[in-house]
Amino acid sequence: MAKGKRYSQQFKNDAVQYKKDHPEMTLIDTANHIWVLSKSALKHWSASAKQNDGDVISCGSGNYSSDEAKEIARLRRQLRDAKDALEILKKQSVSWENDRYCLF
């Protein structure tokens, strides 16, 4: 699955402010004007800003509440990758065992 373009928190806040400043523009026109690839992203940011007193709240890359939360996320990714590598090695080991018995 392809990941979309990542926008900074400042860009998101500026995009929502631009939409507020230009109510005569449609959502599609605004997204095209500020080079946002997805009109649904702009719509989501606007809804988020409306619910959170003008600030866009998002849980994307780099949006951690503290350094500790960032470290926990990094360690979880590292653990997941290690588990995936272990599973691959286990499957390969079983394959080698089966091949060895075929030789004798």
Image (cartoon, rainbow, N blue to C red):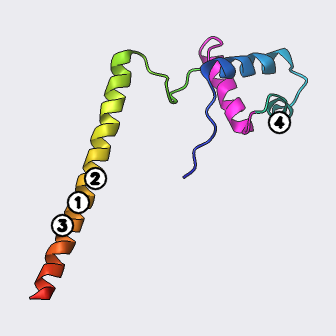
- Are circles 4 and 1 on residues that touch, CB within 8 Å? no
State the SS at label 4: helix
Q: Which residue is mark 2?
A: 85
Residue 91: percent from left, percent from top: 23, 66
Residue sitting at x 67%, y 17% = 13
- The amino acid type of the residue labelled 2 equals Ala
Q: Which residue is mark 3?
A: 93
Task: Tell me, yes or no, whether the highlighted magenta stretch contains residue 13.
Answer: no
> Which mark is first along the chain, 1 or 4?
4
Between the C-alphas of marks 1 and 2, the distance is 6 Å
- Are circles 2 and 3 on residues that touch, CB within 8 Å? no
State the mark number for residue 81.
none
Residue sitting at x 59%, y 15% = 52
Which range is magenta?
36-55
Most foreground residue, 71 or 40: 71
Residue sitting at x 62%, y 11% = 53
Q: Which residue is mark 4?
A: 28
Label 2 crowd (10 A; few <14 / some 14-19 / many >=20): few
Most foreground residue, 20 or 32: 32
Horizontally, residue 64 falls left or right of residue 58, namely left
Question: Splitting the image into 4 quarters, where does residue 58 fall?
Answer: top right
- The amino acid type of the residue labelled 1 equals Leu
Of tags 3 and 4, which is closer to the observer? 3
- The amino acid type of the residue labelled 4 equals Ile
State the SS at label 1: helix
State the mark number for residue 89.
1
